[in-house]
Every structure is written in C-alpha cells, then in structure tokens.
Image (spheres, rainbow, N blue to C red):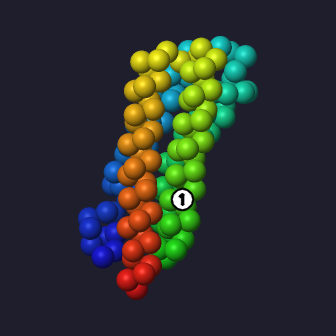
Amino acid sequence: MNQESRGLKSFTDLNAWKEGHALVLQIYKTTKAWPKEEVFGLISQIRRCAVSITSNIAEGFSRQSYKEKVQFYAIALGSVTELQNQLLIAKDVGYIAIDNFNTIAQQSIKVHKIINGLVKSSKSMIHNS
C-alpha cells in the first residue's frame, strides 16, 4: 500500500512529522531563554538537530523507493537520539528545568517510536515488493 492510498498527500500528513514539529516548537521555545553565550554553541546545535528530524522525515516522504525512505527515516531517528543527548547536557548544566526536560524528553521518545514504526513499515514494503 503506497502513501497516496493511505490518504497521505504531504509529509505534513505523517504523524511522525506532526509530533516532530511539535518537538521542534518546544525546543525553540525552551532555548529562547538560554544564556546568550550559547547562541553559537548548544542553542544552535540543539535547534539544528531538532529541525533535522522533521527535515529528514519530509525528504524521506518524497523519495520514490522504500529503500531511500528507510535511509532518511533512519537519519531522522539518529537526530532524535542526538537531540536526547543534547537535552541531557542542557539539563545537567542547568539550562533546562527538570519538569521542562521531562516534557520534552517524553515528546522525543514519542517521536522516536513513531519514526521507528515508519522505518519498520517501509522495510516491510521493501521485503513485500
């Protein structure tokens, strides 16, 4: 079953992108209050990483082969894991309060699980074709 037959017309229809986008917005809101000396350090790194998640989901969606889709969705998974690491650093250096950290960490876990489902689904399409 291809994406169009499942009612997916755009990458923005994917739950992985929707939840990833919510994560990006959380990251931007949170990092806005961080120390200005981190603008070219952790703030830049964590924002690029979060944006990379949804960017790779979008790019994977537009690919024609499921093998290519898996490649981009796997990169998005790596970006989620990288983001989780950066969030731990931000928490440990005191840039993010524990309650905010927990909220964002839970969202990142949700995004990771959904993208992992996309990877598995796309891999099954490779094996079924």
Residue 58 versus residue 68: which sits nearer the camera?
Answer: 68
Q: Position of residue 7 (x, y in %)?
A: 26, 65
Disc 1: which residue: 74
| Corner quadrant of residue 102 | top left
Report the residue at 44% width, 72% height from top. 123
Residue 93 in view (yes/no) = yes
Dot 1: what SS?
Answer: helix
Residue 87 at x, y percent in the picture = 56, 29
* Total tally of numbered discs in the picture: 1
Q: Which of 123 and 40 is in front in this view?
A: 123
* Quadrant showing the N terminus: bottom left
Q: Is residue 34 left or right of residue 110?
A: right
| Amino acid on which disc 1 is placed | Ala
**Label 1: few (<14), some or many (≥20) within 10 Å?**
many
| Residue 4 drawn at (x, y percent) | 31, 70
Residue 17 in view here: no
Q: Which of 27 and 107 is in front in this view?
A: 107
Q: Where is residue 83 in the image (x, y as percent from the top left)?
A: 57, 38
User: Residue 56, relative to residue 95: is it above or below?
Assistant: below
The relative height of residue 48 versus residue 59 in the rendered view (above or below) is above
For residue 104, above or below residue 11: above
Q: Which of 28 and 81 is in front in this view?
A: 81
Image quarter of the C terminus: bottom left
**35 to 126, vertically: above or below:** above
Q: Residue at the location (59% across, 35% down)?
A: 85
Q: Is residue 50 left or right of residue 44?
A: left
Indicate left or right for 11 with 77 as reference.
left
- Residue farthest bottom in this picture: 129
Q: Residue at x 52, y 52 (%)?
A: 77
**Which residue: 56% across, 65% down?**
71
